[in-house]
Amino acid sequence: MTTQPVADTVAFWDLDVGTERQAAPVSDSVQPLIHTSGTVDIGIFDEQKDIRTPVNEADAKPGGKYYSIVKLFIRFDASETWTTATAWLYKADVLVTAAHCVFSHGQQATCVKAYIGYTAGSAGHRFVKRTAVPVQWMDRQTEQHDMAFLHLDSPFQNVVPISCDTPEISARQHLTVVGYPADVCARGVPGGFSGAPVIRDSDFTAVGVHIRGGSFNSAAVIGGPYGIRAEAFQAVLEMLEEGGGVNSGFQVEVDHARGWLKARVISSPLTILLQGDGCDA
């Protein structure tokens, strides 16, 4: 995992939930989102060996320890094709995933469906109404900023969100990546795991978000002195939900380079915020 200080600078845009509800249905077969770095990746696992361990069915049902890990179906601007990824509940109405799952190659997600307790064709789901990511990801796609927070149109019920924190120094920890992958493809962790929580087994705490597999298996750090401060993103989403009005200290600027974004400045450690207008799917 990358360990560099992260500034509390947030970019966000709104999704048109009304349009999302009218979107074409999700196919039973979709391609995963896979993040590549441009380097030649030599796998560390036997390509013919499936290293995955199926989750106990009871753990994926309500009350199970993995119930708060959800499957995402995502459509990008000007595309009718769905892709898939993993996310997990930080709050009953806020998900965490990888930023490249919602903004990649200059395209932003315009429709996102989140399924909890997923089985093909049968699961409770919500729509994402607002997406927040570090502004550094929007500008430079740096891996330590590859994290996104998704605000749902309504909270999931009877769930236990996953706690998160990354200690400054902690050697020889046993970690587990739990998610909804596609078929084994490439090397290492199968596609579809992007956005999955990297869980510290000793206390079932998320210490990162999985962003890339293969010999460069990596995650973006969450919490602690060097990771993304989840509480900062949560605060921004709460202020936006309340209208981000006069009392919040917002100042509005327009991002002329990206018409679907606006800049907002707040007089606090959360310095610059970017807001996107609702986009049609």
Image: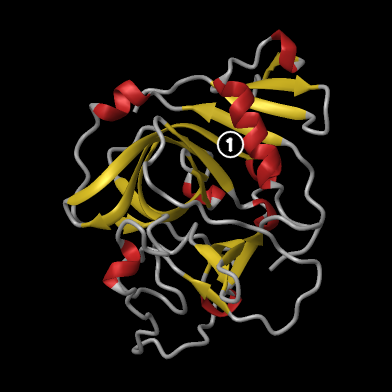
Q: Please tell me which residue lies in front, 79 or 196.
A: 196
Residue type at numbered disc 1: Ala
Count up the numbered dots: 1
Q: Is residue 250 above or below residue 199?
A: above
Residue 1, x across and y down, in percent: 68, 68
Pointer 1: what residue? Answer: 132
Front residue of 257 and 154: 154
From the viewer's side, name the closer residue of 101 and 174.
174
Furthest-top residue in view?
Answer: 246
The structure residue drawn at horizontal position 30% and vertical position 23%, both measured from the top left corner, is 19
Residue drawn at (42%, 55%), measured in percent from left and top? Answer: 68
Residue at image position (41%, 63%) is: 66
Residue located 81% across and 67% down the image: 168
Q: Is residue 226 left or right of residue 24?
A: right
Q: Position of residue 92 (x, y in %)?
A: 46, 42
Can residue 259 be seen by looking at this rendering? no
Q: Residue 108: x, y in percent? A: 48, 36
Q: Is residue 39 above or below residue 131?
A: below
Q: Quadrant of the C terminus?
A: top left
